[in-house]
Image (cartoon, coloured by chain):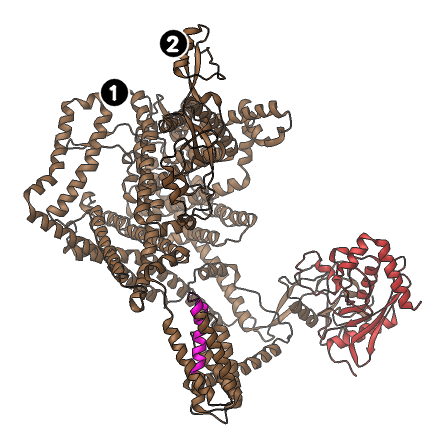
Amino acid sequence: MAPRSTAQKRLLKEYQQLSKDPPPGILAGPISENDLFKWECLIEGPPDSCYENGVFPAKLNFPSDYPLSPPTLTFDPPLLHPNIYADGTVCISILHPPGEDPNQYEVPEERWSPVQSVEKILLSVMSMLAEPNPESGANIDACKVWRDHRDEFDKQVREHVRKSLGL
Amino acid sequence: MSDTEKSCRVCRGEDTESQPLLHPCKCRGSIKYIHQNCLMEWLKHSNKSTKKCDICNTPYQFRTIYDQNMPKRIPLKLIWDKLLSIFLSTSVKTLSLFLYVTCLIVQVPLYWKFIGRIYTWVIDGSLPSVNPTFIGALLFGELDLQQYDLPSDSAKRLILQLRKFVDYTYYSGVRYILVCIIVHLALFVEHEWVIRDEGYTKLLLKNIGREPRTKLVDMLQEVLAGLRNEGEGGNVEAHTNLQRLEMIARAVNDLQAQPANGHYEEMLRRAINEGEAGGQNNFAEIPPEDQGTNEDENVRSSDEEVEPDDEGRTIFVRQEAAVEGGANDNSRRNDNVNQNNQQNVDEGHDAAAAMRNNENVGGNVEQEERPEVGEVEDENDNGPNDGAAGDLLEVLGINLNLSTPVPLMIMCDIAISIYLFIMYLIPHMLGTAFISFVGQLMRAGSIILEKWISIPDSLKGGLPKFLSNMDLKTSFPVSYIIINSFVELLIKSPASVVRRLILENDINGLTLGERIISLSIGYSAISLSIYKIMNKLISRQKPIMGTPRKIYKIFFEITSTAKVFLVFAIEIFFFPVYCGWLLDFCAAPLLLHQFISKTADGTEIFMFLFTSGYEVLQTHYMRIALYWILGTSYMLFFALFIGMVRGKILRPGVLFFIRSPDDPNARLIHDALVKPLRLQLSRIYLSAKVYTCFIIIGIGGVTWGLKYYLTPAGFKYNLVLPVQMPTFGLVVIMTVLAVRDILSKKALISSYCLLYWKRAFEISTHKLRLTHFILGKSVPSERGYVVYRNTFRWLIGNSNPDFKKPVTYRNALQIFREDPSVNACFVPDGNYIRAPENDTISRRFIKKLFVPVTKDDQLLSDAGIHVDEDNENDSDSSSDEFNTDNSYVIVYAPPNFKLRCVALILMLWIFSVILLLGIIFTALLLGRPVVHTVAVASDFFKFSRGFYDFLSSTSQNSEFDWRLADIPSLVLGIKFILIALKFLDQKLRLTENGENEINMAQDEENEARGVFVLGRGWLPRFGQGLSFTVLLYTFAPFLTYLWIFSVHKLCVDLPIRVYTGTPIHKIGNADEQISEDLMEILLTKTTFVIHLLVGLWTVFPYLFFLYRCLTRVEWNELEFTDYFWKALFAKTLTNFGVIHLPATVFTLLRHRHHPLRTIRLSEKDIYIWANMLALFILYKLVVGGRDLLSKVNEQVKSERYVRGRAIENIDLPDDE
């Protein structure tokens, strides 16, 4: 199917770029050639964190007006993390659409802009896994555990990693 | 990155022929390039106010792309058309603005006066005697122009007449309209408050009874019966009917159970409607159930009464229902579908069509919103200029066109005519008729009555004679003046009014006061008749129904509002004015030199009001305004004092008779509405008495007393009083300084005031043995008095009684006899009483208090209490005052309790007099040396005519009298006292708290020190104050004024003089005359026009500047200063450079052989100035024309030839 819209063209370009020069620890691509707006990706847990050794599958959903609007990223199965909602949706500033921020703590430069790309999103998510941002927590329970009982949090995540690897 | 790899940062596309890649921001690397389309799309999507890169924040730069076949020169015709259209729209706007101003601001007040005057003549039956011609009377009313000696010069005469016209007619019209607007706004607000008050409905229902709902029940039951019959017919819709039946039955139950609730009524109405609809359906025999309900819905929604306040929903329902109906009803339209349904269906079709259209439109819009090449919404190009003016007018809701103002004006005029007819003509007619009727009666009555009326006249003649016989005039000037003044004011003028109005029935040329009298008679007659009608309306059996009920409701609304308004007007307006009048009387000795002035024919005029000494204050409205301000501020200070005393000094409950402002029971509107008018008026009368007493004795006693004790009769010079009034400007400056000082040290002053009053209260209550009652501190030694052996012992005061051994008086005498060592004995007396414990007790409860009890709260005598106990179960008080705290305490009350309370007030008054006079005299003594030094120094340095005059010249006599008090010394002295107080305070704090609070107020401390180390602290402050901004703000307008004036004088006035042959007064001559000559500009009709024309280039630009300053509200300080600097200061300087500099240089060059001091402007010099001005105007014209042309050129270009906008690349120097 030949690419028609700007979004499809750009997604194709990005896919080509990603497969030609993949960043370490990241694999991503459309689920099927027919629908470029649904991607699947695998993110490796960053080393020296509790997510180390894990490989986490996630789904990227692109809107039809991509790259004007940001895609959404959902971990499937959900991941225990302060910035990931219980249903697996990632809450990170690079995925937030531009415009006025009601809470005033996200700098406009950090937010979504067509300059960003899938590669940058995934890299940001990786660094988010390494360093959670408790100020804009998405999963309050995870936030509490992470803040007050770090050992417990680490243990739970490691358990999850082990399970997901089938060990 | 090589060129082959460069790609758009949005779509990752390459550089193509049709879509070139641009680099419009400072971003480099992989995100350097972008397609114009992609950028535009992103900008549109992100919807930001500023168009800049969101990575590097560089603003994008746009370039307008013009049509390729745009001619190099815009065709002249296009420019001409554009100019013409600009001229047209501007002139329409200007004309419209002009029309608005003339129609509304100028014409309406004039019309008010004119129509008022015409009505007055109708009432009087003739034109005013001073202006017998119609036009003259219309223009000047009852103003006698002959009293001003009209100049013979016709132009000057015209100007004088115009001034009088503006003064007497226009401003008075404006005043009337303002007062009218204020009164009606107040009425409106109070009306809203009143009808929202719970007491209003209660009172109304009490008067007219509740509306019975029996009628509704009857209707309902009829419907019920009908439905039951139908239901027995066994139709398909019996099911729905049953439901309806059930609902109606429920409604009936509700109605009978709780008739007061309006909610059920509404439900009922709905039910009836439904029932009727159902009935119709049954008649038509349309079986399908959905059809029935559908129509039911239609009927229900078509009924406006069902949900009057939910318009939107109703309409929505109607549409929905109708669309539905339209869908399934087309084939089988029934004849019995009622008119409403028909309409609804039609409407439904329309609505559906409209909705479809809407969708289409939406689609179109969406399609149109697809981005096109280089098209970004245009920024507002016509500049902030028009925007500001337009905004201001838009806020006012004024549309600048030619058609609105005139109809608006006519509407206003008609409204005014009707309003004045109702509010002025009719009451006045009634009043006049009443007065002449009474007059006829009187005259027909008896001669004795006339004699009685003329008694005051003889009294007036007799009293002064009698007084002069007693030689009062020389020995007791105060009483002479007071008696005479009162004769003048209280007896003579009312008597003459009565005589004129009633006995002579001379209603021509009534004075304002007389008109007010007849107007109030008219209004009273009207209100009396309304009162009678209302009474008649509710005299029948309640509840009153139908039209009388409606009429009564309207009348009740009017009278309630009027009552509340009356009470409020008295409390807020008339009462302060009255207080102000009293204060005026008290202030007279402070400011007036003498109280009797003789007119030319020898009659004495008594001036016992200080305002009578000032020409400005002779107009009644100025006086009323002044009185109101004085009275209000007096009442405010009094309230502040009471608040301080109540909150910080007294035992709670002492001032139970004065409502505290934070009393939860104080519901002003409610009280004013519910309480009978007579009671409220009597309360106001009581407080008026108290205030009169306080002001006349408390303040007037001091001022008049000071005047006559410090300046005894026969003494040649006055001492201290009257205060020398400096010039008006100086008074303002001094007041501002003093107020600022006092405000900045408010906390300090109030803390020391509190200290003083605490001490004063302690002393006076202790002396009067009231400490327990007033301050709540039980002092055993106050519960009796001390008996001394003899007067000598009492005088010496070193013999203390043994307070532990109270004795009776008899015992004391015995002890004195028996024991020579005992010189004083303590004899207890008085008793305990119940006193209120707080200020929020109910009025009813107070009646039970103040009874003598023992220390253990046992009643000493139970007489009189029982009566009150019986009344206790009266629940009325609870409804009136919902938050009372009825509790009492037992306090000691000495004998002669009431007398002692009065004495306490007197003592407090003495304390306040000591405080005030102490402060004033100390301030005078402290300030006087400084003022004197300044005066002497300025005398020494010979600028006495400038600074010293400014400082010390009085308005009454220009000589400064050092014997009298003066304002500058007072203000300065108060400042010194404050500084000393501050210093003292800090010393005290230092000794008390160590060094903790040194840093509390560093700057004020510095200030205090600065005075003691003379000048050291003040100089830097002075330097700081003279900052650039202040200089700019003060100097630039002055400079501008100087420029405008000098241009008009030198370049216009002098050439005219030379041309017409009027002698030029020599300029530069050191004579006295210069100042006058310099300022005078020759004014005739021709020169006025010339000045006006020149003004277009001199005054007008600055007026425009002023206008912009005023309309631009959203500017911040910095922008404003900048604008001020550029548009005023720099411009004026340039203007000086363009006209004055070359002209001066030329003049000097022409006279280069003369010494500088002897240079006089000759006629030829003057033409240099005029020519310079002409050059200036020419230059301005050329520049202005060029600007206009280029602007028009741009506009035409942007209108005709713009094809889009492109983004400019930004190239950095280190780019490849």
**Pointer 1: residues within 10 angstroms few (<14), some, or many (20+)?**
some
Q: In which quadrant of the rendered image does the C terminus of chain B lie?
A: bottom right
Residue receiving disc 2: B790
Q: Which of the 4 image quarters holds residue B815?
A: top left
Residue on which the image places disc 1: B713
Image mark 1: chain: B
Residue range in magenta is B256-276
Image position, residue B632 (x, y; %):
38, 40
The residue positioned farthest toward the bottom in the image shown: B331
Colour displayed for chain B in the image of the structure = brown
Q: Please state if B225 lies on the left or on the right of B1014 as rendered.
A: left
Front residue of this view, candidates B628 and A10: B628
Q: Nearer the viewer, residue B1124 or A14?
A: A14
Q: Residues within 10 Å of mark 2 (few under 14, many from 20)?
A: few
| Residue type pointed to by label 2 | Asn
From the viewer's perspective, is residue A38 above or below residue B895?
below
Q: Is residue B265 inside the magenta stretch?
A: yes
Direction from residue B374 to residue B92 in the image, left or right: left
Chain A drawn colour: red
Dot placed on the residue nearer the N-terminal end, 1 or 2 = 1
Image quadrant assignment for residue B909: top left
Q: Is residue B602 magenta?
A: no
| Image position of B778 with respect to B351: above or below | above
Question: In what element is the residue under mark 2?
Answer: loop
Q: Nearer the viewer, residue B873 or B519?
A: B873
- C-alpha gap between disc 1 and disc 2: 42 Å
**B622 sits left or right of B1130 in the view:** left
Closer mark to the observer between disc 1 and disc 2: 2
